[in-house]
Image (spheres, grey):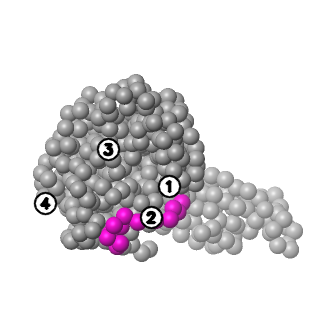
Amino acid sequence: MRFTIFLVPTREPSRYILPMPVTLTDIRAAQRRIAGGVIVSPCPESIPLAEITGSKIYCKLDNFQRTGSFKERGARNALLRLSPPARRRGVIAASAGNHALGLAYHGRLLGIPVTVVMPDYAPLIKITTCQRLGATVLIRGTDFAEARREADALVADRNLTYIHGFDDPDIIAGQGTIGLEILRQVPDVDAIVCPIGGGGLIAGVSLAVKSLRRRVRIIGVESISTGNFAAALRAGHPVTVARRPTLADGLATLTVGANAFALARRRVDAVVQVTEDWISLAILRMLELEKTVVEGAAAAPLAAMMSGQLPGLRGRKVVLVVCGGNIDPAILSRVIEKGLVHDGRLTRFTARISDRPGGLAILCRVIAETGASIKDIAHDRAFSGPDVSAVHAVCTVETRDRAHIAALHRALKKNGFPLVVAK
């Protein structure tokens, strides 16, 4: 696998310098403003994750928020900053899900009407939850840009206030409260590893942390299927990145925000990209080792640690920003199965056996003697070749690891079963 680390430049072209939209004072004000409405999420140490990464790992569990995401912080802060007339008219946003959930929940608590426009790839669980929380949900467009255009049209038609999910200064200030909490919970932290989509989260976190502890390293993580921040670094300004399918749907924003980029580019020490396979495996590791369900974006920091791209963090105190847990259950089940295959704990092969009585029993006995467990067997007679006395048995088998799979294959071949192994 090929991975790239993008070091953040220390100088920026003057034509892209924007007025500083957020300050540490704004983040501290946001922290006071949202207190009582948004929980201070836990940040426990994880011994199991430390064992597999070689670092002293802490997990900032913002998937514990009421709607399962850090987005509540910025949403509540932005809603509380509205004027009374704007509150009465209501707000609108384009969102793939978590920003919409945060607005819907806190809009209901504060009595502010909320409309959200979602692209058609938004997870079903996020759509239905938004509706249950009382928001008006519109499914429009194949990507975030199309959803945003629809939202902008409704802003003009209905005189609503648009709240940008990752580039509004009040949103960025709200997300920055995570950084303040981390410094209080892990005061001697060496590095914070944070996912990047539109950039609002890492902009707020890096501003809060670097303003108070400049030595703390801020590492951003993207999926290779998104890459918004890395593309902006190469160009020197935000650019549009074509959307590709990704488990980390929360990172699929097409571009990093201009305000977020201006804030983060000098404060983020490095950006790494991880493959979908590593994200999938990280979701499984969080489920098994931390007993917590996370979505793809939230698994990205652990994926970066496991993939070996951050060797400089070995032995260091590292906080992983676990930003959300809103993964579609149907997707989760497929992720678990793919993770088991990656680990060598689930394998599939086709064995050629006799179609006479006892043929299948012999195959099952050999599998059982190796300590493997048969999950499924299907007979394929139509495509088993010219010998009508033989049949292909397609077997899905549970194993301990890859060494166990190799031992199983050797035993089957020793007992005269030709194999075709699924890749």
According to the picture, the residue beneath numbered tag 2 turns out to be 240
Sooner in the amino-acid sequence: mark 4 or mark 2: 4
Sooner in the amino-acid sequence: mark 4 or mark 1: 1
- Residue 309 can be seen in this image: no
Q: Amino acid at mark 1?
A: Ala
Q: Nearer the viewer, residue 301 or 311?
A: 301
1 and 2 marks in contact (CB < 8 Å): yes
Kindly identify the residue that appears in the image at 62 percent across and 62 percent down.
Answer: 348
Local SS, label 2: loop
Bin the neighbour count of mark 4 within 10 Å (Cα to Cα): few under 14, some 14-19, many 20 and up. few
Magenta span includes 237? yes
Q: CA distance from mark 1 to mark 3?
A: 19 Å
Measured along the vertical axis of the image, is residue 91 above or below residue 120?
above
Kindly identify the residue that appears in the image at 22 percent across and 49 percent down.
Answer: 22
Give the foreground label among 4 and 2.
2
Sooner in the amino-acid sequence: mark 1 or mark 2: 1
According to the picture, the residue beneath numbered tag 3 turns out to be 171
Local SS, label 4: loop
Q: CA distance from mark 3 to mark 2?
A: 21 Å
- Residue 209 can be seen in this image: yes
